Image: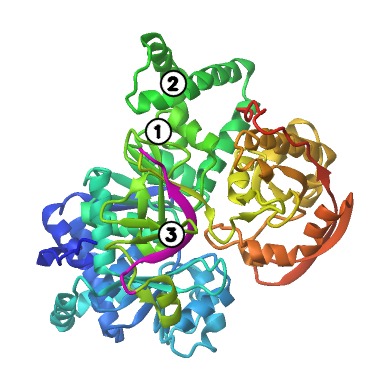
């Protein structure tokens, strides 16, 4: 591995990058935030001033070198500024998932020993107060939004703006100390600590240095030719490494603008207003957008539906080739240009993608049909492969070499090797320092030479050098007859259909595959309304005979597609059921990043899995659920188990386009 040297003085930390940006891009917009329907903006020079005042306010509160500062809330400038201000003070920012319940937060806050907690609003403050008596190390709770906070005990509770104003007023007393601490920051100082999603156990605190973040941001920015003129929409959880790299690492390296939406409810509207040039989303976001498009098309008039289907058929055939600069006949180019005017352009504008120059998806595999849909519109959507422990980037797709079945080539500065079992290992300048307070896990994940075990199985294609991911190594198995079992491959095909929100496939060491399915309440509810089908709940709609029949058609369509791949044809689904509840992170069934916790699901729903394999036609079950306020309850239902036809190997005609 090529060693990376410490760069020139103004590039060795995020606060140092901030000072460079204030010098070189001082009047350029650094942040925008929409509040009360109005966009407010701050230049890089103004951002530096705000962060310095906030950092000096932290010093006035007694923030010490090495303190951990928890950040809980939605994407907004004050929260990003709190992270940089903490870094200036020599402290370590630790963003948490704002939708986590109090018990989840308690583990992270106790594990990192946070003395300071920055909260977005009253809801987050209440969670911290609920657990504060058990966590005696929390000394100061700061909040951004004052609404509802008036009657609280403010002895150790402060409005973030008051702390900023205190820093501004007392800057003569703290400036020298702040500059001293900032000068102490090096390439190997801790930049941030991010907790893993914890799919197999308690979350681990991943310690990332300035070297990890800055080198990765530099290399990935050069790979995609990012520049100061780019704009992003920061809407993903701040506790997720992707948001930190895109909205902090790359934003500060390049000096581009970070836009913060008003709320999750207005995100799509705000996306259209900003029209970012650089966009990232996990597959679920692209899936939900496609579902919304399909719903609107079903409700459109006959002429609009015909135009959409006509031009989308053309787009699927020639759009990706035009995007990649490949030869396409003049007639098709002309027809595609007409489609851009009549369909593709308005659709991209409605989605907020009219200016996207570089788009990425990652986190889990995206269905190939969904991926091709966006590329056929002329959106430069690509895939990358990464992990928190890698500061995101391990492999990514170069322009004009984009395919749905690979994650691209090795990212700049990264090395990859694949062992005899097919597991992928990497090392790079972005490789994490350690798991906080967990030397055993650090040693088992990263060896003495810096190679990190990903837990994923894959291989390099001969000739192209592209990496293909099969599945999580622990999830890839064998059917009873020795055939390969790769559940994610089938699940992604199922989730292409707008009616299907989530799928979990079983079959390891068994004679055949079965599946749990969650319907998409928005899509299926819209269908029910169009067909005058009354329903009172998700559970009632999920068990409707016509819904089960529709899902069966989808499963059989996927079976025909899976049958085309001789290596994975044994993964066709023989039986399935539609769950009576949505899989939920609050119930422990998914992570906060919406990854399925397979082992927990297998244990929790063992009775349903057994029924899928014992020939039962229905089963009564009771399931414990967690409500939004943390209370526990239960729901009961009788579920129908549905048989699905399988297809002969190699005889498929492929999945339906719509």
Local SS, label 1: loop
- Residue with the mark numbered 3: 419
Where on the picture, by quarter, is residue 54?
Answer: bottom left
Instruction: Please say if 212 is above or below 89.
Output: above
Q: Locate residue 228 relative to residue 196 in the image: left or right.
A: left
Dot 3 crowding, Cα within 10 Å, few <14, some 14–19, many 20+ = few
Residue 318's label in the rendered image is 2
Locate the C terminus by quadrant: top right
- Residue with the mark numbered 1: 379
Asked whether the residues under the numbered discs 3 and 2 touch, taking CB atoms below 8 Å apart as contact, a structural biologist would say no
Q: Locate residue 293 relative to residue 443 in the image: left or right.
A: right
The residue located at (36%, 62%) in the rendering is 390
Residue 491 placed where, x, y %? 62, 46
Asked whether residue 34 is in view, the answer is: yes
Part of the protein shown in magenta: 448-463
Is residue 31 shown in magenta? no
Residue 121 placed where, x, y %? 47, 68
């Amino acid at each position: 591995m090529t060693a990376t040297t410490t760069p020139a003085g103004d590039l060795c930390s995020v606060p140092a990058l901030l000072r460079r940006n204030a010098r070189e891009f001082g009047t350029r917009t650094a942040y925008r935030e929409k509040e009360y329907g109005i966009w407010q903006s701050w230049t890089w020079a103004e951002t530096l001033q705000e962060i310095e005042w906030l950092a000096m306010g932290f010093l006035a509160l007694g923030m010490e070198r090495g303190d951990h500062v928890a950040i809980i809330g939605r994407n907004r400038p004050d929260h990003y500024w709190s992270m940089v201000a903490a870094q200036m003070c020599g402290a370590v920012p630790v963003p948490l998932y704002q939708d986590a319940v109090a018990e989840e937060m308690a583990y992270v806050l106790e594990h990192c020993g946070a003395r300071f907690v920055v909260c977005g609003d009253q809801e987050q403050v209440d969670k911290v107060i609920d657990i504060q008596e058990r966590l005696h190390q929390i000394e100061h709770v700061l909040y951004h939004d004052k609404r509802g906070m008036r009657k609280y005990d403010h002895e150790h509770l402060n409005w973030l703006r008051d702390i900023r104003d205190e820093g501004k007023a007392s800057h003569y007393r703290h400036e020298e100390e702040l500059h001293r601490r900032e000068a102490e920051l090096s390439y190997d100082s801790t930049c941030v600590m991010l907790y893993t999603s914890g799919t197999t156990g308690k979350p681990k605190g991943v310690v990332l240095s300035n070297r990890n973040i800055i080198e990765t941001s530099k290399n990935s920015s050069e790979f995609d030719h990012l520049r100061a003129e780019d704009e992003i929409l920061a809407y993903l959880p701040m506790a997720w490494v992707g948001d930190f790299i895109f909205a902090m690492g790359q934003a500060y390296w390049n000096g581009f603008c970070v836009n913060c939406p008003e709320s999750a409810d207005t995100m799509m509207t705000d996306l259209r207003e900003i029209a970012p040039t650089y966009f990232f989303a996990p597959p679920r976001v692209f899936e939900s957008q496609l579902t919304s498009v399909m719903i609107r098309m079903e409700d459109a008039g006959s002429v609009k539906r015909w135009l959409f289907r006509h031009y989308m058929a053309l787009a699927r055939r020639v759009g990706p080739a035009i995007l990649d600069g490949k030869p396409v006949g003049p007639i098709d180019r002309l027809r595609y240009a007409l489609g851009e005017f009549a369909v593709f352009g308005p659709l991209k504008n409605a989605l907020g993608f009219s200016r996207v120059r570089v788009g990425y998806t990652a986190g889990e595999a995206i269905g190939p049909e969904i991926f091709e849909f966006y590329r056929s519109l002329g959106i430069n959507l690509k895939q990358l492969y990464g992990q928190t422990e890698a500061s995101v980037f391990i492999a990514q797709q170069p322009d004009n070499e984009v395919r749905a079945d690979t994650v691209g080539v090795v990212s700049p500065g990264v090395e990859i090797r694949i062992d005899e079992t097919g597991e992928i290992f990497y090392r790079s300048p972005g490789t994490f320092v350690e798991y906080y307070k967990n030397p055993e896990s650090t040693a088992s994940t990263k060896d003495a030479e810096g190679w990190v075990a990903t837990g994923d199985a894959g291989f390099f294609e001969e000739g192209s050098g592209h990496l293909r991911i099969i599945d999580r190594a622990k999830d890839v198995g064998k059917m009873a007859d020795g055939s390969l079992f790769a559940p994610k491959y089938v699940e992604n095909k199922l989730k292409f259909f707008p009616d299907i929100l989530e799928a979990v496939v079983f079959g390891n060491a068994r004679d055949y595959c079965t599946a749990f399915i969650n319907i998409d309440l928005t899509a299926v509810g819209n269908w029910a309304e169009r067909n005058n089908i009354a329903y009172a709940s998700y559970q009632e709609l999920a068990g409707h005979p016509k819904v089960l029949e529709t899902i069966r058609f989808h499963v059989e369509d996927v079976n025909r597609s899976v049958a085309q791949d001789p290596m994975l044809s044994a993964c066709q689904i023989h039986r399935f059921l539609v769950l009576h509840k949505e899989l939920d992170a609050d119930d422990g069934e998914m992570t906060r990043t919406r990854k399925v916790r397979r082992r927990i699901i297998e244990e929790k729903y063992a009775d349903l899995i057994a029924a899928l394999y014992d020939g039962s036609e229905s089963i009564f079950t009771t399931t414990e659920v967690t409500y939004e306020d943390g209370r526990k309850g239960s729901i009961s239902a009788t579920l129908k188990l549905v048989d699905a036809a399988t297809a002969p190997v190699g005889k498929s005609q492929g999945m339906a386009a719509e």
